[in-house]
Image (spheres, rainbow, N blue to C red):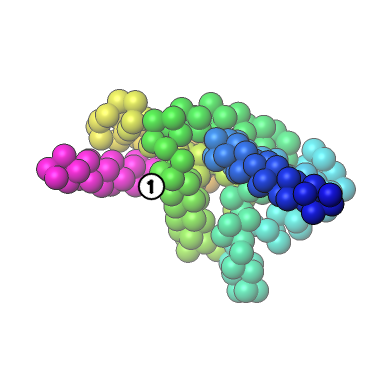
Amino acid sequence: MNATKQVNEEPTTRSWISTFIVWLKRVPITFWIFFLNLLMYCYTAILSQNFYIIDIGVQEFFGVSGESFNAGRFFVFITAMFVHQDLLHLGLNLFSLAVIGFVFETRGGRTNFLIIYFLAGLTTNALSLILFPQWTFVGSSAAIFGIAGATIMRLLQSVIFGALFILALFAMAPPMSFLSHGIGAIVGVVTDYFLRKRTDKNNQKTRNR
C-alpha cells in the first residue's frame, strides 16, 4: 500500500515541477531584471541601514572604479549594473525598464534582450573605468538605454532614426549621464542591427532549403 502511494506521488511531483518550469519560461526576462534590481537595492539598503540613500562606501564596494578594479573586485562589472544611489535613482530606472523592456522583449525576444542589456552595461562600465578611473559608476541606466536604442531601431526600422535618438541623448544629458546613456544607446543600436541581420540571414537560409 505504501509502495503504491509512493509510485502515485512521483508522477504528481514531476508534473508540478514541469508546470513550474513552464511557468518560469513564460515569465518575461524584463520581470527578472526588474526583480534583480529591486533585490539588490534592498540588500544595499540593509548594508547602508538607510532605505532612501545608499551609503557611499557600499556604492564604492559594488560599483565600477579604478579602486575596485585594482583591488581585484572584478565582479563589480556585473554588480554595478544593479546598484543605485538612492530610491529616486532606482525608481526612475525601474520605470524606464518596465516601459521599454516589455516593448522590446515582445518584438526582439528574450535572448536578444539579455544580449543587448548586458553587453550595453558591461561595455559602458569598461569604458567608464578606462576614461574616468577616479569615479565610481553604478546604475542600470546604460543597460536600459541599450534596450531603448534597440527598441527605437525595432519600432522605426531605421538606422537614421537610431542615430537621431543617440544625438538627442548627446544634446540633453549632463556629462556623466551622457557618457553612460550615450554609450549604452550606441551599443544597443549597433548590437540590435547585427542581431537582426543574423536573424534575416538564418531565415533566408531556411527559405532556400
In terms of secondary structure, what is the magenta stretch mainly? helix
* Residue at 38% across, 47% down: 187
Mark 1: which amino acid? Val
Front residue of 196 and 190: 196
Front residue of 130 and 112: 112
The reply to whether residue 36 is in sight is no
Find disc 1 in the rendering and name its residue. 187
* Residue at 53% across, 26% down: 99
Location of the C terminus (image quadrant):
top left
Q: Residue furthest right?
A: 49
Residue 33 location, x and y as percent? Answer: 59, 42
* Residue extent of the magenta highlight: 185-209
Q: Residue furthest left?
A: 208
Front residue of 34 and 135: 34
The reply to whether residue 207 is in sight is yes
* Residue at 43% across, 49% down: 115
Front residue of 10 and 63: 10
Q: Quadrant of residue 64 in the image? A: bottom right
Q: Classify 10 Å Cα crowding around label 1: few (below 14), some (14-19), many (20 and above).
A: many
Residue 24 location, x and y as percent? Answer: 60, 40
142 displayed left or right of 80: left
